[in-house]
Amino acid sequence: MAREQRDDAGTDRAERDGAVKQKLTREEKIAARRARFAKPEPELTEEERLEEELAEAARRGADDWGPPPGKAKSFWSSGRRLLGLLHPYRWWLALVFALGSIGVFLVVLGPKILGEATNIIVQGFIQRQMPAGATQAQIVEGLRQQGQDDFANMIERMPDLQPGQGIDFEALGGILLIVLGIYLVGSLFQWLQGYVINRIVQRTVQGLRRDVEHKIHRLPLSYYDRMQRGDLLSRVTNDLDNVSQSMSQSMSQVVTGLLTVVGVLVMMLSINVWLALIALIAVPLTGIILGVVMGPAQGLFKEQWKRTGKLNAIVEEAFAGHALVKVFGREQAVRARFAEQNDAVFDASFKAQFISGLVFPLMTFVGNIGYVLVAVAGGLFVAAGQILVGDVQAFIQYSQQFSQNLGQIGQTITMVQSGVASAERVFELLDADDEASDAGGAVPEEGSGRVTFEHVRFSYSPDRPLIEDLSLEVEPGQTVAIVGPTGAGKTTLVNLLMRFYELDGGRITLDGVDTATMTRDALRAQTGMVLQDTWLFGGTIRENIAYARPDATEEEIRAAAEATYVDRFVHSLPDGYDTVIDEEASNLSAGEKQLVTIARAFLARPSVLILDEATSSVDTRTELLLQHAMAALRTDRTSFVIAHRLSTIRDADLILVMEAGRIVEQGDHDSLVAAQGAYWRLLNAQFEQAATDLDLEEELAETGAVPTQQTT
């Protein structure tokens, strides 16, 4: 009896609910459907978690994935590789060496000649104190008899002594003019050397930039999944600029410094061997200083540029999503994240500069010690009559040049360390594994667009299979809608069709030809793609539409624009098709940008079309307009549609329901709803908003707000 009463009560309740539902207006039904759409998020599947991890790894620069693909180099191997880039310019480098040698020879010759000028002044002052008419031998003999042997030795070493005569200003003036000319010519040769070096370096870096640009186009999509965009841009810009600056400055200084050290050493040995040996005390001390400082400094420079890349990634991410940051009030969090990384850059940069900055003062200190020892020893040698005052003056100048150039070389090495650290990051990019090469050049004989998946297997990570044993056949001209929860493999499926990733097993054929045997260019020439995230470059609307076919005529461009409803809004723009799209296409609405991408795909005339979430980011009215544009685009083409809205997929010839990388159901809308399986559950769980959209579409169609049929 109780059970019968419950049944009767349930029947009465159902009848009352039915009566209420009949009284509901259209607006109330729409509101009710929208309310039912607000449901808690379901528990994530393993595949959904994997997809989120991939997205998070890409956003954070893949810190948990280890280093990006590539071969990290040590300082010496990276330095040798960087020098190897100069090999095509070896004859220019020989010219640099020749110009540097001449310039250094002239500059090094200066102190020796100036020493002769000093000798003329000292000799003139001394010989004026001597009796006129006496010979040099008589004066030397007289001094020895007086016990002044050291002074006698000095007088004996003076050439062409003329007692009673003063300073020979004519000879002194000639020497000064010669020195001035030598320094002018030497400076000219050093300028020419710097000019040639700068040309060599800029050509080298230009070639390196070209290699990087070509490499970027050869990298597989998986590389970009694991590399943060800001860090990649930092390698292409900041690191390459640092390589250019380091090479420009260090090459000139190292070549000039080494040649000067050698030239100065030769001149010092020619003046006095013992003084030269005293000056050479600085060499082993310099080696010790460089050995102690170079190791820690190199590691710190590498860390500095690594952290700089991460900082640039944060700035780029915040700039790209600045609107979203403001909407959610995350400015403080972004500033905190930036400040944290900025402090890390400061810490690494300060330590690198502090350690490397020790080289120059330490080497200057060592050089000053040698300078003092040379000055003292030189004075003793002059007092003993073993060397002339001018020679000591020249030697002191040489000693100063010797220590200065050693210090300059040491300072240059720290600059080289920074440049090699940046070059290593660039080489990591260049050494990353290329996209698998095209196996052949097979081309389908027909352009009908028949697509088959035969036992396809794929995974982003070897230990986490995503798609397993997927088979599918799509007839030419069919529209295939792919639905399923996040992480089910919908986008992956079309990425495999485009060969953005290579299969782990099975094969995909286009008109009977295995896509793995086709070149990527040939395959992608027959496919068109319209993405949710529209991409338009800085150019006119006409140029953006013709991007896929630069040789398209004006009539073809306008026909594509009219067929996809671009023509409707273009006429409202000041310059029409010549309107220049500004940065990030901010002068077009989201719907207008997407219409332009649809027109671009229409003009390309692909046999296979992929619509990846192409309408999920626009309002309902705009979506309806886009749907009509896409209907024109899909005509006579095999189409794969990925969408979350029922209105996008309801008219598909075939609907694929994917879960965990497998097709669990397939059929048309009515048959899948009747089966009340996975597709039906998705409708109840995720697509109920689309039912509201259908009602809104009917209302808009009744008012004439959107076209009801395709017109050409």
Image (tube, rainbow, N blue to C red):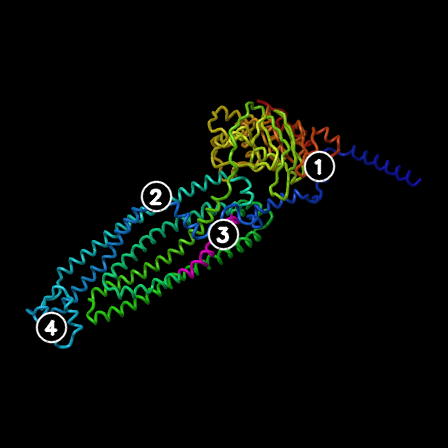
Q: Is residue 92 above or below residue 135?
A: above
Q: Nearer the viewer, mark 2 or mark 3?
A: 2
- Magenta segment includes 292: yes
Which of the marked residues, 2 or 1, is nearer the chain's N terminus?
A: 2
Which of the marked residues, 4 or 3, is nearer the chain's N terminus?
A: 4
For the record, the magenta segment spans 290-315
Say which residue label 2 marks. 89
Say which residue label 4 marks. 141
Mark 4 neighbour class, 10 Å CA radius: few under 14, some 14 to 19, many 20 or more: some
Which three-letter amino acid code belongs to the residue tagged 4?
Glu
Which three-letter amino acid code belongs to the residue tagged 2?
Tyr
Mark 2 secondary-structure assignment: helix
Give how far apart the Cα atoms at labels 2 and 4 are.
63 Å
Q: Nearer the viewer, mark 1 or mark 4?
A: 4
Give how far apart the Cα atoms at labels 4 and 3 are.
75 Å
Mark 3 neighbour class, 10 Å CA radius: few under 14, some 14 to 19, many 20 or more: many
Give how far apart the Cα atoms at labels 2 and 1 are.
65 Å
Mark 4 secondary-structure assignment: helix
| Residue 545 horizontal/vertical position (percent) | 51, 30
Q: Nearer the viewer, mark 1 or mark 3?
A: 3
| Residue 337 horizontal/vertical position (percent) | 55, 53
Q: Which mark is residue 306?
A: 3
Q: Which mark is residue 682?
A: 1
Which of the marked residues, 2 or 4, is nearer the chain's N terminus?
A: 2
